[in-house]
C-alpha cells in the first residue's frame, strides 16, 4: 500500500510569494512601456502567466484557485472583446481597421500624459495571452 507523503515546501512557497509579486510588477511595467519601447500586452501577459505557473509549482492547483478564483476562458473572451472592439472602433470614424488615436491630457498627479486607444488593444492582448496560456497549462497539468 502506497501512502502519499506530504512535502514541506515552506522555503519554495515563501520565495514564490515574493518572486511572483516582483514578476507581476515587472510584467505591468513591460505592459505600460510597450508603446514607446519593446514590450506590450503579449510579453506582459506571458510574464504574468509565468508568475501564476510559479504559484502552481509551489502550491497545488486548488490553493491557487482559491487565491485567484478566475475562469481563464472568460478572461480570454473579455480580452478578445477588448481587442476586437478597439480595432473595429476605428471603422466608426471611417479610418482603416486598427487605426489608433491618441491625445495629450493634463492629469492631476501625472502631469502632461498621452493617452492612447492602443492601451485598450494591448489590454485585450494581455488578457487573451493570460487566459489562453493558463487554460492550456491547467488542462495539460491536471492529474488526479
Image (tube, rainbow, N blue to C red):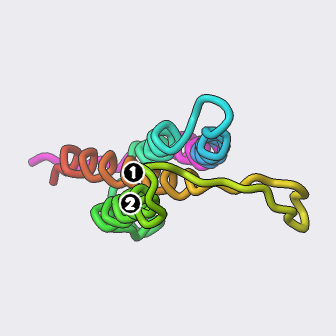
- Residue 8 magenta-drawn? yes
Image point (50%, 39%), residue name: 47
Residue 31, horizontal then vertical, whole percent: 59, 44
- Of residues 45 and 143, the one nearer the viewer is 45
Residue 6, horizontal then vertical, whole percent: 35, 50
Residue 88's disc is 2
Q: Is residue 76 above or below residue 20?
A: below
- Of residues 7 and 111, the one nearer the viewer is 111
Residue 33's disc is none
- Residue 14 magenta-drawn? yes
From the viewer's perspective, tell me whether residue 114 is left or right of residue 35: right
- Of residues 84 and 98, the one nearer the viewer is 98
Image point (60%, 29%), residue name: 38
Residue 15's quadrant in the figure? top right
Give the SS element for disc 1: loop
Image point (33%, 59%), residue name: 76
Residue 55 visible? The answer is no
Residue 92's quadrant in the figure? bottom left
Residue 123, horizontal then vertical, whole percent: 51, 55
Dot 2 or dot 1, earlier in sequence: 2
Classify mark 1: residues with Cα within 10 Å, few (<14), some (14-19) or many (20+).
some
State the quadrant of the C terminus.
Answer: bottom left
From the viewer's perspective, tell me whether residue 103 is left or right of residue 44: right
Give the SS element for disc 2: helix
Q: Which residues are magenta?
A: 1-18
Which residue was labeled with disc 1? 97
Residue furthest to the left in view is: 1
Amino acid at each position: 500500500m502506497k501512502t502519499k507523503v506530504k512535502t514541506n515546501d515552506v522555503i519554495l512557497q515563501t520565495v514564490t510569494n515574493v518572486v511572483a509579486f516582483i514578476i507581476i510588477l515587472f510584467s505591468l511595467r513591460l505592459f505600460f512601456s510597450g508603446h514607446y519601447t519593446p514590450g506590450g500586452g503579449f510579453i506582459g501577459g506571458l510574464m504574468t502567466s509565468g508568475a501564476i505557473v510559479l504559484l502552481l509549482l509551489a502550491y497545488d492547483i486548488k490553493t491557487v484557485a482559491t487565491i485567484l478564483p478566475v475562469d481563464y476562458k472568460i478572461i480570454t473572451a473579455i480580452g478578445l472583446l477588448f481587442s476586437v472592439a478597439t480595432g473595429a472602433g476605428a471603422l466608426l470614424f471611417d479610418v482603416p481597421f486598427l487605426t489608433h488615436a491618441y491625445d495629450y491630457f493634463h492629469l492631476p498627479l501625472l502631469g502632461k500624459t498621452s493617452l492612447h486607444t492602443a492601451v485598450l488593444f494591448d489590454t485585450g492582448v494581455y488578457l487573451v495571452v493570460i487566459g489562453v496560456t493558463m487554460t492550456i497549462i491547467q488542462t495539460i497539468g491536471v492529474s488526479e
